Amino acid sequence: MLRRALNTLVTLQKWIRSAGYTGLLGLLTLAGCSSAPASPAPTPTRPTASGPTANGIRPLPPGGRVDYQLGAAYPVPPGTTIVARDSTEAPAPGVYSICYINGFQSQPGDTSTWLERHPDLVLKADGQPVLDPNWPDEILFDTTSPERRDAILKILQPTLERCAKSGFDAVEIDNLDSFTRSGGMISVDDNIALATAYASRAHALGLAIGQKNAGEFSARLHTTVGFDFAVVEECHRFDECQLYRAVYGESMIDIEYADDLRGTFAEACADPGSPRAMVLRDRRLVADTGTGYVYQHC
């Protein structure tokens, strides 16, 4: 999906903001921090700090230099070792590549297809689809029964397979916290059950899988679901990095957004609680030639 930058509020704040919301069509430098040039550059050597595990899954290189390219793919900035791209894009060459999949809500371009072909898998309130209030072109999937979860997984299985076949090392499954926007109709257990199925399929395909946000559930998601690392948005801004580091150590990446950063990025990098793999991006995640492009790393 071309986005997932505005899903910035911590889960508790989302609970507060979205409680009862089920309407219809309702992110400079410091010593060690620098900005990468926008011009294309040779890709770096593939990271080798963490080799394949016994099952062939390559773990996230701890503390690697990250770029988050969900809005558009572009040449890898010099020195970058981890790149996340949308599942519709090719993996970045020469780096650890993470494939983005929206696993609990529709992709904006696919919303009409879900409504037309799979209306029984769309969460509804008073007969109307429940939307993400930050992204009203995305509808929530109904994960409330084993039958519905199995059907959702079957529909997204080809996307997981495409990520593996095209050469990605890992997947991140977004919107695990959709239950916080469901007005109480979806439980955390419903979504964790589907997340467990996603993790099983990803591992069977030789892919590592990353937990996306939902920090307070990290221990359970790591041990029960089997998430291998974490992909976090604005954990420095919201003082929640430790929720992930306590479980994953440095096997996590954090994206801070230039329009909403608490303090400066230099301060974020200097914060001892921040992960080493932290990047500053523009919220729209535009390409390096796009208006408003921002990319800095610690």
Image (cartoon, rainbow, N blue to C red):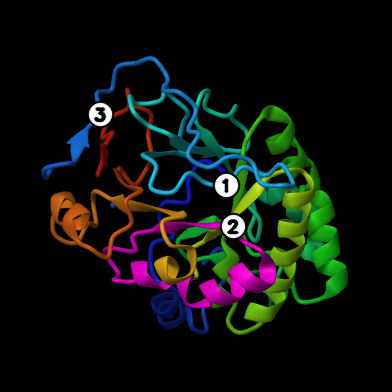
The amino acid marked with disc number 3 is: Ala
Quarter of the figure with the N terminus:
top right
Q: CA distance from mark 3 to mark 2?
A: 28 Å
Q: Which residue is mark 1?
A: 59
Q: Tell me whether circle 2 and circle 1 mark residues in contact (CB < 8 Å).
A: yes
SS class of the residue under badge 1? loop
Q: Which of the two discs, 3 and 1, labels the residue nearer the N terminus?
A: 3
**Is residue 124 visible to us here?**
no
Q: Tell me whether circle 3 and circle 2 mark residues in contact (CB < 8 Å).
A: no
Q: Quadrant of residue 37?
A: top left
Q: Which residue is mark 2?
A: 228
**Is residue 106 visible to us here?**
yes
Closer to the camera: disc 3 or disc 1? Answer: 1
SS class of the residue under badge 3? loop
Q: Position of residue 59 (x, y in %)?
A: 57, 47
Residue 183 in magenta?
no
Q: Is residue 123 found left or right of 260 in the rendered image? A: right
Decide: few, some or many residues near mark 3? Use Cα within 10 Å; few <14, some 14-19, many ≥20: some
Q: CA distance from mark 3 to mark 1?
A: 25 Å
The amino acid marked with disc number 1 is: Pro
Q: Quadrant of residue 244?
A: bottom left
Q: CA distance from mark 2 to mark 1?
A: 7 Å
Q: Which residue is mark 3?
A: 36
Q: Residue at x 63, y 71 (%)?
A: 223
